[in-house]
Image (spheres, rainbow, N blue to C red):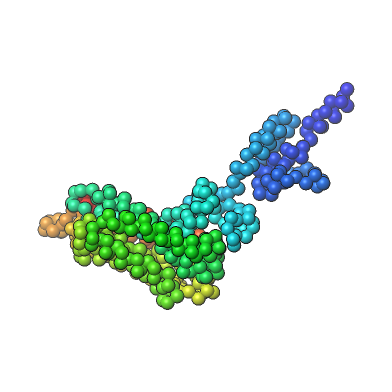
Amino acid sequence: MAAFWISRSSRRLRSSPLSYSLIKSFSDPISSTTSLINPIPSEPFHEPSVFPRTLETRYKGYIGSGFHTWKFNCFNSNLTNLSIATICTSSGVVEGTKNGGNCPGEREGSKSQVSWIDLYLPKAVRPYAHLARLDKPIGTWLLAWPCMWSITLAASPGSLPDFKMMSLFGCGALLLRGAGCTVNDLLDSDIDKKVERTKLRPVASGCLTPFQGLSFLGFQLLLGLGILLQLNNYSIVLGASSLLLVFSYPLMKRLTFWPQAYLGLTFNWGALLGWTAVKGSLDPAIAFPLYISGVFWTLVYDTIYAHQDKEDDLKVGVKSTALRFGDSTKNWVSGFAIASISSLALCGFNADLGIFLFLAFHVCQPWLIMILTSINIFCCTGWPYYASLMAASGQLAWQIWTVDLSSRDDCNRKFVSNKWFGAIVFSGILVGRLTS
């Protein structure tokens, strides 16, 4: 009788191959999922000598309880919905393992970034969504902020900006940014194939043919035209003229070390267009300093961004400010940041947001504030705008001082953080207009 109970207890404590497969699936999901779906009967079973520490309690709880069979059935029934992925918080996408991609050029087992596009959109639509960079909204933010700045500056003192106009420009920024990416990919497909970061783009990888990309570009431009036609005639002509910059920008990296400056001219066109859409004409004293500040801002963030590809750019033979500046990059972009903030300050002064308060706080001299107040030349209505400029200066300084130009991930993080610079400036303009 004693021998019977000992034998029974030993059988209960023995690990079954099925329960061990389940435990292995939690500790190594990639390799174990294959073994669960396609088991190999001829392979001998070996019990693990040491259980994974993180799974020890769970593993012991299932042993001899009969519960592991039910657990495995639930796990097996949902294998088709298993997504082997980890969240990439910096770019808002999911990084997973690609098991034989849907597109030519995607190597089996290669590691790539899988975004919400691949998870939720129909397969036929995915390459076009990737072509428009819908899963990377930072480009849309950077294109939209100068428009929002300009529209808000054009609002009457004490009034909110035109929300309908802001909605139109937000949709326009999304479409124009997608069209710009399409043009860039069509013209640079030969270069993209040689660059690690861009070799899996839809046109470069063969997901889409050049004709399909061109057709999609026509569709985007047609939608953009529908938005543009809702503006006044002056704005229609001014907006249409920006297409020259959009189509010629991809060629600049072959011709000059300053393609980032050309991108600044392109990306900040909305600073001019937003003002004319509200006012019906262009005020150079306000719109031009705003436009110039955006160009210098673009030189800051896109030079940092270009450091991601500097090794590949050298091999391929394309040019950028990252290669032009080299080890002096931080000095150059510091100068661009100062020029950007100074242009924003001039724009605020010309827009009657006040200048003396900004100067007083900028040099941190309380006695200057007292003197300006006593002689009644101290305009205090625009202080939120200049306070936001100081906060925006701090954000740019943080980027420049802390960025590791040899790290692609850190360069990308600093680049993406520029959406907050745009938000800070916008909030200052908004509050400044409401209180003026």
The answer to whether 198 appears left or right of 248 in the picture is: right
Nearest to the observer: residue 1 or residue 298: 298
Q: Residue at x 36, y 56 (%)?
A: 223
Q: How many marks?
A: 0
The answer to whether 264 appears left or right of 89 in the picture is: left
Residue 175: quarter of image: bottom left
Q: Where's residue 233, x and y in %?
A: 23, 60
Nearest to the observer: residue 59 or residue 239: 239
Please say if 315 is above or below 381. Answer: below
The answer to whether 101 appears left or right of 317 in the picture is: right
Nearest to the observer: residue 150 or residue 187: 187
Nearest to the observer: residue 292 or residue 103: 103
Q: Residue at x 27, y 58 (%)?
A: 274
Please say if 54 is above or below 299. Answer: above
Residue extending farthest to the top is 1
Viewport quadrant of the N terminus: top right
Residue extending farthest to the left is 375
Q: Where's residue 196, x and y in %?
A: 55, 65
Q: Residue at x 82, y 46 (%)?
A: 42
Residue 85 makes an appearance in the image: yes
Q: Residue at x 79, y 35 (%)?
A: 14
Residue 321 makes an appearance in the image: no
Residue 45: quarter of image: top right
Q: Where's residue 155, x and y in %?
A: 21, 53
Q: Where's residue 318, x and y in %?
A: 48, 74
